[in-house]
Image: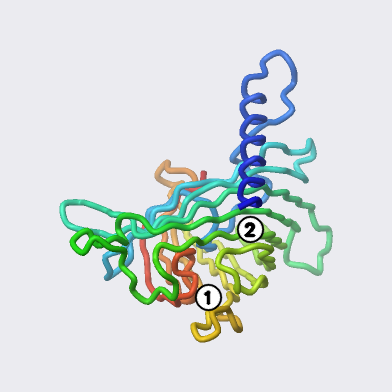
Amino acid sequence: MKRTHYFGRIFCILAALLLISLNTTQAEPLLKPTLQTIFTPLLADPQEPRVAIMPWVGDHFLQLDIGSSADLYQSNSKEFAAGVDFGTYSLLRRSDNFKFPVDAIDYIFGVNASWKKPLHNDALPFEEFSARARISHISAHYEDGHFDATANQWIQGDCPFPIPFTYSREFVDLVLALSSPGHRVYGGYQYLYHSIPMGISPHSFHAGVELSTAHNTYVATDFKLLPIWDYSLNETRGLRGTWNLQAGVRLDGIGLERARLACNYFSGMSRHGMYFYRPESYTTVGLIMDL
């Protein structure tokens, strides 16, 4: 709880600095907030803050993400930046009469720093090195879509904890990337330094590839090694590969800059905190906005 309050204070301070910079008219502002971040958000990472609506194919669920990353400060050389991340990842149930009760929702906020440097090595097929470090907090909750109004109780399902239960995590995440126009490869490590419930391994890893293809299309993949929950031990044991494969088309050609239609195939440990113990496999198709 103390760590949650600590992150809350950081977020409030950053928000105050943002308002001060926006209202400074006579002096050069200390901060120049921009959504044009130095480190380009990862295309296929399902936990990247973004705006997206992605219905599941063949199932009555829908993913709704609302969030973004912003640089509050960028150096004059555009090689260093410091910023914030904020967003929600929601899992909605599709029901009759165009209703979408929320089954589960995750909230994320934190701070980040990013770097990039041009590469001058003809032996490498890349032109730029970039990196991003984050300190973030995630809390997750069941909502009305996970409540049985007829029985007047929460839907227990396969959850290993009495519902409702508390889920939160604080972590440090580092990503290193090599890129050339339209292409990027990256790898990263995440260290979880506090979690509720306890017993979750602090170590996870991720990597990915992004490739631009013909006619504004692209393909991308994000791979993670995430802890597996052991029901008998009430803690995690071992790691499981988690894939998110994405193919899409950027809509710049029809005037919708920074928008893309995408198809995802996800297989592995759930991205939602309320289901961190559960493996899932599904396909989604929808719209993603890169703010």
Q: Give the residue displayed 42% in from the left and 60% down from the top.
A: 262
Q: Farthest residue in the bottom direction?
A: 232
In what element is the residue under mark 2?
strand
Residue 277 seen from this side: yes
Res 249 → quadrant = bottom left
Please rate how many residues cluster around mark 1, counting C-alpha atoms within 10 Å: few if below 14, some from 14 to 19, many from 20: many
Q: How is the image coloured?
A: rainbow
Name the kind of residue labelled 2 in the image: Glu
| Residue bearing the label numbered 2 | 170
Residue that badge 1 annotates: 242
Q: Foreground: 286 or 278?
A: 278
Tags 2 and 1 touching, CB below 8 Å: no
Q: Quadrant of residue 221?
A: bottom right
Note whether 209 is above or below 28 in the view shown. below
CA–CA distance in space, label 2 to label 1 = 20 Å
Q: Residue at x 66, y 24 (%)?
A: 20
Circle 1 — which element?
strand
Q: Amino acid at mark 1?
A: Thr
**Residue 49 % position (x, y):** 53, 52
> Which comes before the other along the chain, label 2 or label 1?
2
Disc number for residue 70: none
Percent position of residue 101, x then y:
28, 54
Neighbours of disc 2 within 10 Å: few (<14), some (14-19), many (20+): many
Q: Write down the quadrant of residue 155 in the picture.
A: bottom left
**Where does the image place residue 222, in percent across and percent down from the top left?**
56, 69
Residue 278 in picture, x, y percent from top left: 45, 75
Residue 283 against residue 65 in the figure, above or below:
below
Q: Is residue 235 above or below residue 176?
A: below
